[in-house]
């Protein structure tokens, strides 16, 4: 039951991390906006919450000396998967920090043309403090605060990875996978071959299409003519 619960938590963490990776790739592009940055913030916080809970469960299980045999090997496989997921999350968070710093949502405004407008200071201040200016200022504050928070969260994830390695000694190269390398690709390839084979059998057992046979014969004749012409040109040259 404990391993199944850890698997469910790890599966949720993988999905949230994959979603965060997809969102990070759009930072700085045409789809970038404050809504995207807010969604990034919520997604990475959710990923960190799942990572903390999963780390606590796996650490407690692997530090239990009564855990032996296949059950321990299963938890070690989950531990390796969790470590890799956490490494990817940290890398995406660093990428989001770099892209967010390079492409800020609201750049500081610098007047390029002096209009010569003058007047009472209170009136000028009243016009400047419009609803649009206040909203722009709030959005700018969110951008700066989010990047600062992201830096702190990156340090927290790095510290979590370091603590994991200190508390639980599970070298990745010592953990054996259930399947050999490329097993999933082989199973997909076998399924594709079987489907193609079934289709070919159905085609052979079905009635012959004379129009397709004629088209194939004409195509073969044209191809042979092209090959013969190429050979003749090569000899003459």
Image (spheres, helix red, strand yellow):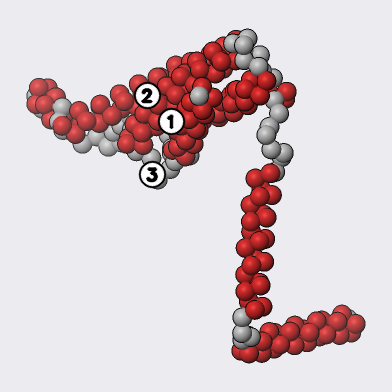
> Seen in the image, is 199 located left or right of residue 109?
right
> Residue at (68%, 32%) from the top-left corner?
177
x then y, percent, for residue 224: 79, 84
Q: Residue tagged by mark 3?
A: 31
Q: CA distance from mark 2 to mark 1?
A: 9 Å
Sequence-first disc among 3 and 2:
3
* One can see residue 77 in this view: yes
> Residue at (80%, 81%) from the top-left corner?
227
Instruction: Tell me, yes or no, whether the two marked residues, 2 and 1, touch with CB atoms within 8 Å.
Output: yes
Crowdedness near tag 3: few (<14), some (14–19) or many (≥20) residues, C-alpha within 10 Å = few
Sequence-first disc among 2 and 1:
1
Q: Residue tagged by mark 1?
A: 100
> Seen in the image, is 135 located left or right of residue 102?
left
> Residue at (12%, 22%) from the top-left corner?
121
Circle on res. 146:
2
* One can see residue 158 in this view: no
Q: Nearer the viewer, residue 189 or 234?
A: 189
Q: CA distance from mark 3 to mark 1?
A: 13 Å
Instruction: Tell me, yes or no, whether the two marked residues, 3 and 2, touch with CB atoms within 8 Å.
Output: no
Q: Nearer the viewer, residue 137 or 221?
A: 221
Tell me if residue 91 comes above or below residue 19 in the rendering: above
- In which quadrant is the C terminus drawn? bottom right
> Residue at (89%, 84%) from the top-left corner?
236
Which SS class for mark 3? Answer: loop
x then y, percent, for residue 179: 69, 38
Place residue 221 in its image quadrant.
bottom right
x then y, percent, for residue 230: 82, 81
Sequence-first disc among 3 and 1:
3
């Amino acid at each position: 039951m404990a391993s199944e619960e850890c698997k469910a938590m790890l599966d949720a963490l993988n999905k949230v991390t994959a979603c965060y990776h997809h969102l990070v790739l759009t930072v700085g592009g045409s789809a970038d906006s404050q809504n995207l940055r807010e969604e990034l913030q919520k997604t990475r916080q959710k990923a960190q919450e799942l990572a903390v809970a999963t780390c606590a469960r796996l650490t407690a299980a692997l530090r239990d000396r009564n855990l032996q045999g296949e059950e321990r090997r299963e938890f070690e496989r989950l531990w390796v998967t969790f470590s890799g997921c956490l490494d990817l999350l940290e890398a995406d968070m660093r990428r989001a920090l770099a892209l967010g710093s390079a492409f800020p949502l609201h750049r500081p405004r610098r007047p390029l043309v002096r209009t010569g407008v003058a007047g009472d200071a209170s009136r000028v201040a009243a016009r400047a403090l419009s609803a649009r200016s206040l909203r722009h200022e709030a959005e700018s504050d969110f951008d700066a605060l989010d990047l600062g928070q992201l830096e702190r969260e990156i340090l927290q994830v790095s510290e979590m990875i370091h603590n994991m390695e200190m508390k639980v000694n599970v070298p990745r190269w010592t953990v054996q996978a259930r399947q050999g390398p490329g097993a999933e690709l082989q199973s997909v390839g076998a399924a594709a071959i079987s489907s193609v084979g079934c289709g070919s059998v159905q085609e052979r057992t079905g009635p012959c299409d004379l129009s397709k046979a004629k088209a194939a014969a004409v195509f073969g004749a044209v191809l042979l003519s092209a090959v013969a012409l190429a050979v003749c040109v090569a000899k003459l040259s």
